Image: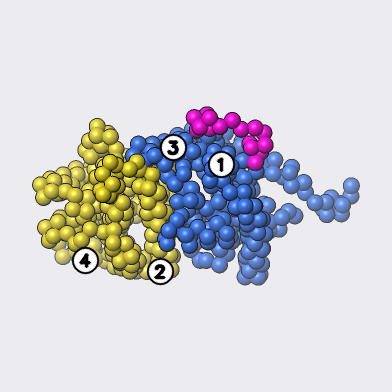
Chain colours: A yellow, B blue
């Protein structure tokens, strides 16, 4: 038990050190991620300006119960959610390791691949939050007039749990996609398709509420909404306590399901594996 | 022609480019499955953007003077320009940092041909050009829905503005590429490119108010990113917002961008040569 904790701590420490080597690159990348939010705010401002005026001119313009401030808040909170759930390079990294034979080191050494990758990602995220905390804080302060007030304690705790579970779902999903490379060596096109579907189905592109009812219902059955849409809805205060609790339970179920799927694919993949390259 | 005459004879750039084009096409045709996959993935991205704005136009009448079909014509124009950039330049610029890392750039610089020409145009991704089919289809469909009948003059002006837009994007890409000489680990060009072009993805007139106006002036009159897609699209599909004076600014700014980017690129090569010698 102590040995396992020590191994995980070593992996975490090495990964943090590796991230800190390319500080400037990391900081620049963090800054760049905030640029699209500016165009998004301006686009939605233009969209709301074009909405047909209602008969009641005293009421603020809404699109599917979203006021302009709610829409801006949604995209800001989706950025926060994606800061937890996005896993850039995870699936492609696994695919690359399988393709060039680097994955052998995980098979001959007493290191579990998925465990190693998980703690590496935790390290990456910790450094990212450290670097991104400042820009995020500035962004939220500048946009404070759009944001709803602080949620109550129960909602805040629920949101934090949702974000952490979103991180785990994001990790397990991307790892699962990467593990497909044990069967299909060239998966870059598949990864692009998955990334694009993720962008759409997670609510990152636009709130899933805007979709017609039947389509929305189908999409909400999938795990993608927990990567961005669900945490944003929690923090916007648009869910009842019951809906929040139900969402968290379903998130836990997805974590368990994806965990077993990833483990299954890994064990089957390793059995099938023959060294390519290396 | 003797040896001295042959060795000092300048190459025909057109014939060299044709050779690049032919070699790239042969290479792509060897991987037909990859060609089809590229087609499918681009189509998927195209469809997702269409779905998003179809949903948006169910909720709103217009986006700052752009109705539904005007906006789809704008999107088609953006696709055309981005397809041309990705087809002819993206792979080469992405490869530049790898050439520096491996030292293969030295061999490229030894060749008796302009370095910028060689580095920018060697590889052509013909499969990406398939986007033009989707974009062209969407453009003509939108123009039909708008009842716009264009003549040769309008189409030539549109294509001319497309060329100007491509030259602006190419200049920016060249400057980003040149930065590889000085930066140790350069962030992937694809990601950087995404953040640069995100501003051109929407019409220039959404940039209003205290937040939008500074961006509008900077990215219209200094680095004309906002005009790259807007001017061609407005000239053909949305004449009520088209501004001929801004079109002149666009053309002049693109010439300045080409000139400045070449200066920066040559300066980068000088730095590279002095470092490696």
Nearest the eye: B157 or B48? B157
Check chain identity for marks 2 and 4: say if they share one: yes
Q: Residue B149, percent across and down?
A: 59, 30
Q: CA distance from mark 1 to mark 4?
A: 67 Å
Nearest the eye: A218 or A95? A218
Q: Residues within 10 Å of mark 2 (few under 14, many from 20)?
A: few
Residue in the image at 35% along x and 43% along y:
A51
SS type, badge 4: helix
Q: CA distance from mark 3 to mark 4?
A: 59 Å
Check chain identity for marks 1 and 4: say if they share one: no
Query: On what subunit does the disc labeled 3 rest?
Result: B
Q: Is residue B120 above or below residue B67?
A: below
Q: Residue A141, percent across and down?
A: 30, 66
Quarter location, residue A20: bottom left
SS type, badge 1: loop
Quarter location, residue B208: bottom left
Foreground tag (3 vs 4): 3
SS type, badge 2: helix
The magenta region covers B142-157
Pointer 3 residue: B68
Foreground tag (1 vs 4): 1
Check chain identity for marks 1 and 2: say if they share one: no
Q: Residues within 10 Å of mark 4 (few under 14, many from 20)?
A: few
Pointer 2 residue: A23
Q: Which mark is residue A6?
A: 4
Q: CA distance from mark 1 to mark 2?
A: 48 Å
Pointer 1 residue: B239
Check chain identity for marks 3 and 4: say if they share one: no
Looking at the image, residue A54 sits to the left or right of residue A37; the answer is left
């Amino acid at each position: 038990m102590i040995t396992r904790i020590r191994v995980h701590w070593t992996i975490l420490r090495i990964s943090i050190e590796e991230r800190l080597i390319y500080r400037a690159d990391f900081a620049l990348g963090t800054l760049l991620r905030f640029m699209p939010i500016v165009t998004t705010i301006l686009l939605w401002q233009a969209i709301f300006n074009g909405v047909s005026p209602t008969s009641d001119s005293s009421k603020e313009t809404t699109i599917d119960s979203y006021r302009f401030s709610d829409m801006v808040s949604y995209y800001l909170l989706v950025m926060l959610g994606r800061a937890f759930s996005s896993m850039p390079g995870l699936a492609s990294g696994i695919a690359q390791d399988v393709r060039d034979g680097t994955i052998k080191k995980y098979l001959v050494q007493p290191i579990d691949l998925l465990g190693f990758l998980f703690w590496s990602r935790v390290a990456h995220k910790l450094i990212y939050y450290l670097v991104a905390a400042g820009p995020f804080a500035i962004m939220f302060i500048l946009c404070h007039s759009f944001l709803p007030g602080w949620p109550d304690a129960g909602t805040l705790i629920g949101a934090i749990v949702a974000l952490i579970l979103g991180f785990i779902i994001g990790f397990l999903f991307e790892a699962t996609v990467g593990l497909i490379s044990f069967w299909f060596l060239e998966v870059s096109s598949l990864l692009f398709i998955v990334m694009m579907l993720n962008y759409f189905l997670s609510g990152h592109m636009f709130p899933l509420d805007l979709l017609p009812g039947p389509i929305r219902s189908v999409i909400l059955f999938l795990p993608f909404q927990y990567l961005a849409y669900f945490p944003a809805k929690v923090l916007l205060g648009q869910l009842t306590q019951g809906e929040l609790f139900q969402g968290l339970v379903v998130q836990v179920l997805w974590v368990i399901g994806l965990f077993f799927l990833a483990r299954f694919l890994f064990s089957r993949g390793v059995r099938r594996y023959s060294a390519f390259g290396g | 022609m003797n040896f001295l005459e042959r060795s000092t004879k300048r190459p025909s750039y057109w014939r060299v480019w044709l050779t690049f084009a032919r070699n790239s096409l042969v290479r792509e045709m060897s991987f037909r499955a990859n060609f089809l996959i590229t087609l499918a993935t681009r189509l998927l991205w195209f469809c997702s953007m269409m779905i998003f704005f179809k949903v948006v136009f169910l909720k709103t009448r217009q986006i700052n003077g752009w109705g539904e079909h005007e906006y789809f014509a704008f999107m088609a124009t953006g696709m055309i320009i981005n397809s041309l950039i990705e087809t002819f330049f993206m792979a080469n610029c992405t490869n530049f940092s790898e050439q520096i890392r491996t030292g293969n750039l030295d061999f490229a610089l030894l060749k008796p041909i302009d370095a910028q020409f060689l580095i920018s145009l060697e590889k052509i991704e013909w499969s990406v050009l398939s986007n033009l089919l989707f974009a062209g289809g969407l453009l003509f469909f939108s123009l039909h829905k708008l009842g716009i009948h264009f003549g040769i003059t309008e189409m030539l002006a549109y294509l001319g503005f497309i060329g100007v837009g491509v030259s602006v994007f190419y200049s920016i890409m060249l400057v980003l590429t040149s930065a590889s000489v000085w930066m140790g680990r350069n962030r992937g060009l694809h990601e950087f490119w995404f953040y640069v072009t995100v501003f051109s993805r929407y019409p220039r007139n959404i940039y209003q108010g205290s937040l939008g106006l500074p961006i509008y002036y900077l990215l219209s009159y200094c680095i004309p990113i906002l005009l790259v897609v807007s001017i061609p699209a407005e000239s053909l599909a949305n004449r009520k917002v088209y501004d001929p004076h801004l079109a002149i600014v666009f053309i002049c700014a693109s010439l300045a961008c080409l000139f400045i980017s070449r200066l920066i690129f040559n300066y980068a090569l000088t730095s590279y040569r002095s470092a490696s010698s």
